[in-house]
Amino acid sequence: MSESSTHAVLVAHLHQWALSRRECDPGLRIYVDSPELGNPIRPPLVDGYLPDLYCESDGGFNPIIGEAKTARDLETRHSASQITAYLLELREHANSTLIIAVPWHAVPTSKAIVRSLKKRVDGEHVSTIFLERLPG
């Protein structure tokens, strides 16, 4: 699978995760940066970065930002800056969530990176979900 097709699959998994959340919160609005999914509304920019997934709700559900990273892209300076921006945004909300979708073999690395970034920005209260067992 090519780098871009792997990323598209990971974004689709983020989207599926968000759709499953609608069972708990029917008012959940889901924005996905994926032409393949036919979603006409892209997520809002967060400090100049475009997340792969952004969810919000009128029902008191706090924001969710989702990011898909291939193993190759995970350890770049750009990815660290991007995830830092998302953590800075999410730390302003009491019950916000960061969702990370990476190939199965990159999960330990992604957990270490996010843990380090959360400490750096005092965002340790931001809930983090890692989608596991994904292809790539």
Image: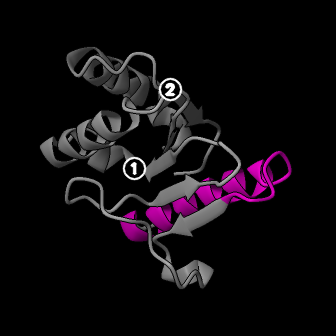
Residue 17 painted magenta: yes
Does 106 appear above or below 20?
Answer: above
The circle drawn on residue 93 is none
Amino acid at pointer 2: Ala
- Tell me if 131 is positioned left or right of 121 in this view: right
Residue where numbered disc 2 is placed: 94
- Residue under label 1: 69
Residue 123 placement, left or right of 22: left
The answer to which image quadrant residue 50 occupies is bottom left
The quadrant in which residue 84 appears is top left
Look at the picture and state if 136 lies above or below 105.
Answer: below
Q: Residue at 36% across / 18% down in the picture?
A: 115
Question: How many angstroms separate mark 1 from mark 2 (CA)?
Answer: 25 Å
Give the image location of residue 92, x and y in percent.
37, 32
Question: Residue 63: image x %, image y %?
Answer: 52, 45
- 56 horizontally vs 25: left or right: left
Give the x, y percent position of residue 79: 24, 45
Residue in the image at 32% along x and 21% along y? 118
Neighbourhood count class around disc 1 (C-alpha, 10 Å): few under 14, some 14–19, many 20 upward:
many
Provide the secondary structure element on which disc 1 rests: loop
Kindly state the secondary structure of the residue where label 2 is placed.
Answer: loop
Residue furthest to the left: 77
Which region is colored magenta?
3-28
